[in-house]
Image (tube, rainbow, N blue to C red):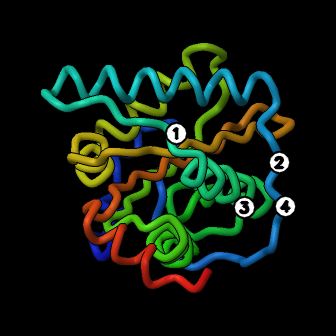
Amino acid sequence: MTIPIPIKALTAGLLGTLASCMPGVTTDLPVSRPNQPEAAIAAQLYQDINAYRREHGGKDLQRNVALDHLAQQHSEFLRTNRGKFSIYGSNVSHYGFESRSLAAQQFYHMNQVGENVASTPSRGTATAARLVSLWAHSPNHDSNMRYGWTYTGIGVVEDRDGMVFATQMFGSYKAPMQRDMLNSLRVH
């Protein structure tokens, strides 16, 4: 999601679920480290996204720990609140994106932030490819994958029944001169 672009509906044949901008239930959740299968899906998703970008003339994204944290937190939120959203099978939402975007801007000095979210049944090593395919078939999500971002963060959570919730955040830092000016204004 990039503000304020609305998300278009996918065809009914898609098994996975893409996000809406519809409000959901808010919950403060601790952020856990992904378990081994989740970390493997996140690592494969990172590789697959960069391969997709290269196929379309883009540059590789760099992983950003801060964006990873925000993405992981949102994926956990999606799992906790699954079934409570009002579109695309009710499992995903961009609820709280404005807060994540603001955090990325204020605390991590990013001037542009975007987000893709989806859920799909786990398919082992093919789960990441399925997520990329879902996003590639949605014009707004595809636009995020192809845009000139510099950094990405990925959060993946798998529920007990095998449903995978994925959030990918995208960001670009402010120009170095702007960052240096901001740093000089901070009280030490």
Q: Which mark is residue 77?
A: 3
Q: In terms of sequence position, does the residue under pointer 3 or pointer 1 come before the other?
A: 1
Asked if 71 appears above or below 166 in the picture, the reply is: below
**Which marked residue is nearer to the observer: mark 4 or mark 3?**
4
- CB atoms at circles 2 and 1 under 8 Å apart? no
Q: Choose between 177 and 140: the one closer to the eye.
A: 177
Number of marks drawn: 4
Residue indicated by mark 1: 16
**What residue do we see at 38% from left, 29% from top?**
49
- Element under label 1? loop
- CB atoms at circles 4 and 3 under 8 Å apart? no
**Left or right: where 96 falls relative to 106:** right
For residue 31, what is the image quadrant?
Answer: bottom right
* Distance CA(mark 3)–CA(mark 1): 18 Å
* Distance CA(mark 4)–CA(mark 1): 26 Å
* Distance CA(mark 4)–CA(mark 3): 9 Å
Q: Choose between 104 and 8: the one closer to the eye.
A: 104
Residue indicated by mark 4: 30
Q: Which mark is residue 27?
A: none
* Distance CA(mark 3)–CA(mark 2): 11 Å
Q: In terms of sequence position, does the residue under pointer 3 or pointer 2 come before the other?
A: 2
Residue indicated by mark 2: 32
* Distance CA(mark 2)–CA(mark 1): 24 Å
Q: In terms of sequence position, does the residue under pointer 4 or pointer 3 come before the other?
A: 4
Which quadrant does the C terminus fall into? bottom right
